[in-house]
Amino acid sequence: MKFPRAALLGLLASASLSDAAFRRSAFGFFSRPSSSSSSMVSLRGIVAPEPRERGAAPSRDRAGAFDDDINPRHRATEEEREEGGEEEKERRHRRYRLLTNEEISTRLRSLAERYPSLCTLTSAQEAFGLPTASFTAGGATVESCPYDHPRHDNHDNIFANHTPAADPTATAAAGGGGGCKNWILTIEDSVAHPPGSTSWGELPEVFLSGALHGNERVGPTAVLEAAELILEAASCEALPRARGRNGGGEGDGTNAGGNAGDFGDGNANAGDVSYARSSSPVFSPSDDEELRLARLCRSDLSRRGISPSYRQWLARLATTRRIVIVPAANALGYEFNRREENGIDPNRDFPYDQTDPSKCMRTIAGRTINELFRNHMFQLSLTFHGGMEVVAYEWGNPSHLSYTSPDDEAQSQIATGFSRYGGGWSPSSPSYRTGPMNDLVYYVRGGFEDWAYAASWDTERVIQCDPSTYGGYDPQKTTYQGDDDDGGGGGGHGGGIGLAHHGPPSIVQLPQVPSTMRQTDVPPTDRERVEVEIIKSLIDSYFGIVRKNYIDMVPKTVMHFLVNHVRDAMQNELVAELYRDAEVPMLMREADDVAQRRETCVEMRELLGRALEIVNEVRDFNTFK
């Protein structure tokens, strides 16, 4: 799974702690369907599901496997392949296969249990009180995702406490308490950035969506594998955590003095990366065990092609940003390998460039993403699709067919970076094409990418949704202009959005520049006076340069004509200010040496004229002699 996972890592690296307030950028990753007639699913895309009778329940049999494009630099030699048996070979040549929805649910729970200080797992149902979606056929509800609803709660502490329960009316409208949950995995270093701290509130945020369309299968596995790789590298880089040992380590850097914080169980001091040197260190049994685990995980990652520098880079991704991952927003569609959620396309379900309020926010997939965007300030987002091999960005709607987005240059550079970083499916394949969705794909109304990018500031194209599905949805939740201080996500999505997790402000909001500048009675501060003087000197310098250019490049007669004959016809205020009457004498004035040269030229012209007359007289005399 070479390109999808690499593209995600490139995206995550694009969001840094220095990100200022700016429009979100949303990218779409499109994978090409395979030309094979087999029912197997490959990395090159998705094979259409086999036809079945109308109204029949879809099958959950989605067997299929595909291989990772292993970097030639990481391929083992023949001798190495003979060593270690089948388990060692599998470790060196890791093979991926498309995961089912149940396997994704199981692996998400496993990640939350293995890395409790690095990630948290919840669902849209636990976090936002949304109902679950169940498949309906012929008016009957088909059992959907039973593994998401265990009969016995073992209190495994995976989910956040005190999360709101699903609305009973909405749950009943959805067909009962069953259905597919919409899982949300959040990667953030809670030790280096304790919840509620300043650094926690200032973390840049990235959103990854694996599947809005349930039959486009690559995305959920790609985002899950990327998450697992980041978490594994970060946890390994944190080892060993014990203090008071020698600074030098054995082998492949067993001392974690270069890590970004404690990624373990949270018992150590956050962010303490200094290890005292001692001539006679004392190791406890736990120290020895952590040293052993550090050597083991570093060695294992190296065998899989993850170099020490690459491992440290992955660890930095985990500790310097917040990564919110929804492997399958359309969990129901992914469960049954169907594009829509109960016949509704989630990628037409967002309230941007729509006209009918009843035709948006009808799916749990759309509501899940809407709730996340109301509670986070995502700088970048990426969603997976199928059908072609492109990295596309805004615009992708009919209202902007002839326009580029305000951030087109930045989006183009980021998309090109993704394409170069990820490469093609194989060494002989070209990199993915990049460009706006209107040019490379096709336009849609209510698409996720344009909504995520522009709904907070292009409010003329945003409508309040009032759907009837799942017991309805509060129209105020699609109003993205509100008070930032409400803290509950009720504010505008983007510019007026509520703060993520009710924490401190993550973005410094600059005051709006007034449309008219007026002098006030308040005396300026020393800093303001200095800034004004700097601006005045810059303006004077620029004006001098422009004036010099006019003097050197424009003939005096042309300037005279412009000033005296064109000025009255010019209504543009800038031109009227530029050609001031008081400046005419100065503009018409010429240097003394220029005037002297002109007078000399006039005298020479007169002398030459006189000489020509004499020559003509001599010629006429000789002619008639």
Image: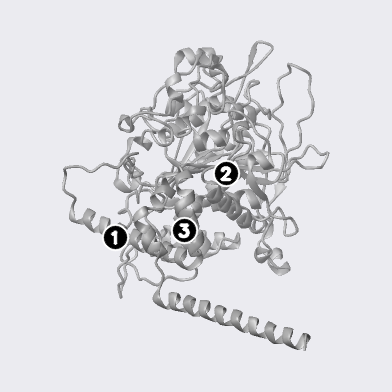
Kind of residue indicated by mark 1: Ile
Q: What quarter of the picture does the C terminus occupy?
A: bottom right
Element at label 1: helix
- At mark 2, the secondary structure is helix
Instruction: Residue under label 3, please give it.
Output: 560
Q: Is residue 94 above or below residue 339?
A: below
Q: Taking 20 as reference, is 388 left or right?
A: right
Which of these two is toward me, 55 or 383?
A: 383
Residue placed most toward the observer, 79 or 98 = 98
> How far from the left and from the top, in percent, is residue 530?
23, 58
Image x and y of residue 3, in percent: 64, 51
Q: How crowded is mark 3: few (under 14 residues within 10 Å), some or many (20 or more)?
A: some
Type of amino acid under label 2: Val
Mark 1 crowd level (few <14, some 14–19, many ≥20, 10 Å Cα): few
**Could you tell me which residue is drawn at 60 percent across and 59 percent down?**
304
Label 1 and label 3: CA atoms lie apart by 33 Å
Q: Could you tell me which residue is drawn at 67 percent across and 57 percent down?
A: 93
Dot 1 or dot 3: first in sequence order is 1
Which residue is outermost to the front?
A: 625
Which numbered dot is residue 472? Answer: none
Mark sitting on residue 223: 2
Q: Tell me where residue 360 appears, x and y as whole percent.
A: 55, 22
Compared to residue 362, the image places residue 140 above or below, namely above
Q: Nearer the viewer, mark 2 or mark 3?
A: 3
Asked if residue 166 can be seen in this view, the reply is: no
**Residue that badge 1 annotates:** 534
